[in-house]
Image: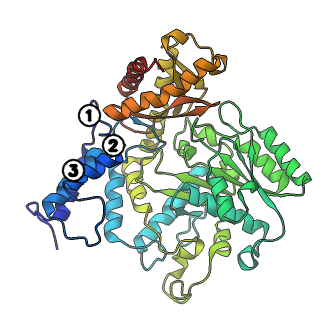
Amino acid sequence: MSLTDGSTRIEKQIADRALEYVLHPPTGSDPVVDFAAPGDLLAVFDEAVSIDMADVVQPAPDSALMEAVELVLKHSMHTSHPRFLNQNFAGPDPVSVVGDWLGAALNTTGATFEAAPVFTLIENALLKKLGRVAGYRVDDEPSAIPPGLFCPGGSTATLYALQLARHRHQPDVVRVGAGPDRLVLFVSDAGHYAAVKSAALLGLGMDAVMKVASDPSGAMNTEALSAAVEHAQARGLTPFAVIATAGTTVTSAFDDINEVADICEAHGLWLHVDGCYGGSALFSPSQRHRLAGVERSDSFVWNLHKMMGMTQQCSALLVRDPHQLAPCFATGADYLFQPDKAHGEYDSGDRTFQCARRVDSLKLWLAWNHHGDAGFADRIDHAVAMADHARDVIRRSGGEFVQVVDGSFSNVVFAWVPEDLRPLASLDALDDSARDRMHLLPPAIKRHMQAEGTAMLGFQPIGGCNTFRLICMSSTVQTDDIDAVYRLISTYGGNVTSL
């Protein structure tokens, strides 16, 4: 069956509208979001197709469905807008979007070769390429086990990595359960909360996660790590893993992986690198030095849906020794992984916890082949260049803006300073009254942005005081957009200085 250009079927109407949005997303003075409160959203959808689901759902007319589609587009966050600087992801690469649609249209699982012959080979090739980019030794034979697997997000990948680490420590854990050792792992106090969630799910307990002090930029203090490992051992605990962070969520700081690897090797610990955010720096010859030593890690998680603009999700967990995957996760289900079927050696499903597994490889494969290595490098270099411009604006602002955390990657953490508090040497120099006032400014300014839909950027407490976090993820953001956002902050800030 084919749909002609003149078809009015609802599927084609929605697809055409979606493609139009992908190819021509909002920009410039267009709103980043038409923000509405929950009650208002429910009311406006009631005029088309109700968000609430009735006890008996009747088919909606095509016209009502298309009206609802327009409402979805109108009131959703436009992450493709160049003034969306709010998260460590942004608008998707258009080739990735249509690649995702194609994968969804074929609607198969990546668990076995027979169900996904092309996708299995594509995934294997991508994992081997990513492994080579990371500096892992990779067996490039077509039938060789690839150095990892695709996962439904970075947190899940960290969970898998810690299970691999525990399995190496206790090879019979999958059969008999946890042993008597009280296992502990280490991550910086600026690291991702996935470590704590994973420890809880693995039955280690949240208290098994030892938070290590970081420096003012957010990078782990490796002397503190060494002391923490030795202290844990002296208390009778059993260290088994360390998570080094390559690109922290707030400040985009990078731990010194080589120094962390030295400590792990000295104590026989599994080294997992959380490169969910910053792993893509490896694509850029001028930025890959930030992950020096990643090839020494035992595992490495890399979210391509962050800096590279793949649709959510597209997460790769790389493993230095992929032969560890099957002993840790395999159960040998004989209705799927029959040893006597054709090309069963290509099946990946018994090397992961998942059974049915969404195809996340096609969109990356298409986009990478479209842009090439040079295009991927350009995307990273552009992000850093835009962040450098944002830092330069702060330096030239005459004290109106101050950089709160030093950094040189894609995040800029800063404060807007009311005129009567300038020049501000540091947040620590404020008295309690002024500090409270500074703390209230970012959320108040952001509420103005949301209400008018002019821009989106995040804020978070640094040292107990709210500060702005501008993240340059979008490949479409330009210096004019950065300048416009600073002007908006200044304007909105002037309207709320009575706080």
Q: In the rendered view, does 132 fall on the left or right side of 458?
A: right
- Dot 2 corresponds to which residue? 78
- The answer to whether marks 1 and 3 mark residues whose Cβ atoms lie closer than 8 Å is no
Q: Nearer the viewer, mark 3 or mark 2?
A: 3
- Dot 3 corresponds to which residue? 70
In this rendering, is residue 253 above or below 134? above
| Residue appearing at x 37%, y 35% in the figure | 450
Measured Cα–Cα span from mark 1 to mark 3:
16 Å
Residue 464 in view, yes or no: yes
The residue under label 1 is which amino acid type?
Answer: Asp
Indicate which disc, 1 or 3, sits on the residue closer to the N terminus.
1
The residue under label 2 is which amino acid type?
Answer: His
- Dot 1 corresponds to which residue? 30
| Residue appearing at x 65%, y 57% in the figure | 299
Q: In the rendered view, does 48 fall on the left or right side of 75?
A: left
| Residue appearing at x 52%, y 16% in the figure | 395
Q: Residues within 10 Å of mark 2 (few under 14, many from 20)?
A: many
